[in-house]
Amino acid sequence: MDAALSPLLRTWRWPVIALVISLTMLATAHAFERLAFLLPCQLCLRQREVYWAAAAMAVTGVILWNIRNNRRFLVAFNVMLGLVFTTGAVVAAYHAGVEWSWWPAPSGCTGEAVDVMALSLDGLNDRTAIASCTDAPWRMLGLSMAGWNALVSLGLAATSFVAAGLAFPRAYGELEPA
């Protein structure tokens, strides 16, 4: 398995893959919002922020890698990317726990369910609807979107840490000059 994944994880390819997955997760979230009319709650929006941060980091990382490709930079970058995805997994797991009533929702996150189709367009500048963090409007195989997001983020974090380990220069001959 190491030989099969090594070419993807040892170089700039993993940040590009992480960028594509992050943008796909954001597109999926926006598609559920726009096409399925599932209004996001505050915790849903927090989960999106993590993917925006990961996407921005991935673009920056690929640009910097092309300027100066240094294995130590790639190790540090993959560790930071892993930490961002770990943060996403924690936020998503917290949100899933709120949906299952394992712990209380944060303040301001317990709004009533809103029919998006019945909203008035008179006050577009005013926020008139707040989705509840305690409701899971969609489940697949028993997991809500937050639960699936926790699993995806956890997988991305683990892959980022594996990529950091594979990029780490092992032998003295692999070290590059500073």
Image (cartoon, rainbow, N blue to C red):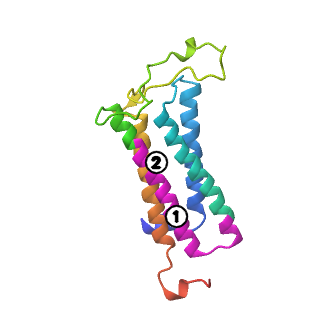
- Is residue 86 highlighted in magenta? yes
Instruction: Give the farthest residue toward the left.
Output: 102
Compared with 59, 99 (above or below) is above
Residue 175: x and y, percent? 55, 84
Q: Residue type at mark 2?
A: Gly
Horizontal arrangement in the rendering, residue 46 relative to residue 176 (left or right): left
- Residue 86, compared with residue 166, is above or below; it is above
Residue beneath disc 1: 78
Kindly identify the amino acid type of the residue bearing the numbered disc 1. Asn
- The numbered mark, 1 or 2, whose residue comes first in the sequence reads 1
User: In the image, which residues are magenta?
Assistant: 64-92
Q: Residue at x 54, y 22 (%)?
A: 37
Magenta region, main secondary structure:
helix
Q: Which residue is mark 2?
A: 88
Q: Position of residue 76 (x, y in %)?
A: 53, 69
Quadrant into which the C terminus falls? bottom right
